[in-house]
Image: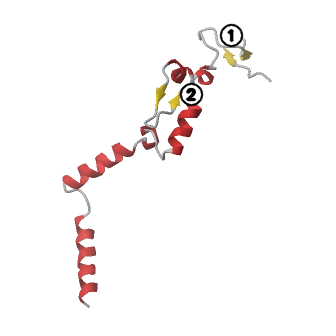
Amino acid sequence: MARKTWHWDPDEGRLVEGPSPGRTESGDSWRFSDRLYSDKPFKGHDGTVIDSKKKHREYMRRHGLTTMDDFKGHWDRKAKEREAFYSGKHDRESRREAVMRAMEKHRG
C-alpha cells in the first residue's frame, strides 16, 4: 500500500489528500536521503565503499564508531561543567569533606 500525504485545508476545514499547495515536495524527501551518499560515495579507512545510509550505519557499527550527533548536548554540558570548575562555582566544601573522611578512614 502506498503512503499517502495529507494536509489541512483551512478553506474546507478538513484534511485533504496530497501535498499542501505551498509545498513543492510531497514530504517524502526522507526516503531519498540515500542520494546524499550515492551522489558522493566515499571510502572508509579499510577501503569499504560507502554509498548508502545503511552501509554507513553497518560500517560504523562494525568498527565501533559513532557520529557527533550521538553526542547532542554533550559538549555544551561539559563546557558548562568546566566553566563552573574553573570559576570556583563547583562544590569545594563537599569535596574537602570527602577528602577528610578518606584520610581519616586511611589512618584508622
In the image, taking residue 15 as reference, residue 33 lies left or right, namely left
| Element under disc 1 | loop
* Residue located at (54% from left, 26% from top): 51
Which residue is outermost to the bottom? 108
Q: Quadrant of residue 19?
A: top right
Q: Which image quarter is the C terminus in?
A: bottom left
* Residue located at (28% from left, 74% from top): 98
In the image, taking residue 31 as reference, residue 96 lies left or right, namely left
Viewer-side label of 1, 2 = 2
Which of the pair 71/32 is nearer the observer?
32
Q: Where in the figure is residue 103, as x and y percent of width and height?
A: 23, 81
Q: How many marks?
A: 2
* Residue located at (52% from left, 39% from top): 59
* Residue located at (61% from left, 13% from top): 25
Which residue is outermost to the left? 87
Colouring rule applied to residues: secondary structure
Q: Where in the figure is residue 48, as x and y percent of width and height?
A: 51, 33
For the residues marked 1 and 2, what is the alpha-carbon distance in whole angstroms? 42 Å
Q: Is residue 54 above or below residue 94?
A: above
Which of the pair 47/95 is nearer the observer?
47
Looking at numbered disc 1 in the image, what kind of residue is underneath it? Asp
In the image, taking residue 35 as reference, residue 3 lies left or right, namely right
Q: Which residue corresponds to mark 2?
A: 52
Q: Which image quarter is the N terminus in?
A: top right
Q: Which residue corresponds to mark 1?
A: 11
In the image, taking residue 85 as reference, residue 39 lies left or right, namely right
Q: Residues within 10 Å of mark 1 (few under 14, many from 20)?
A: few
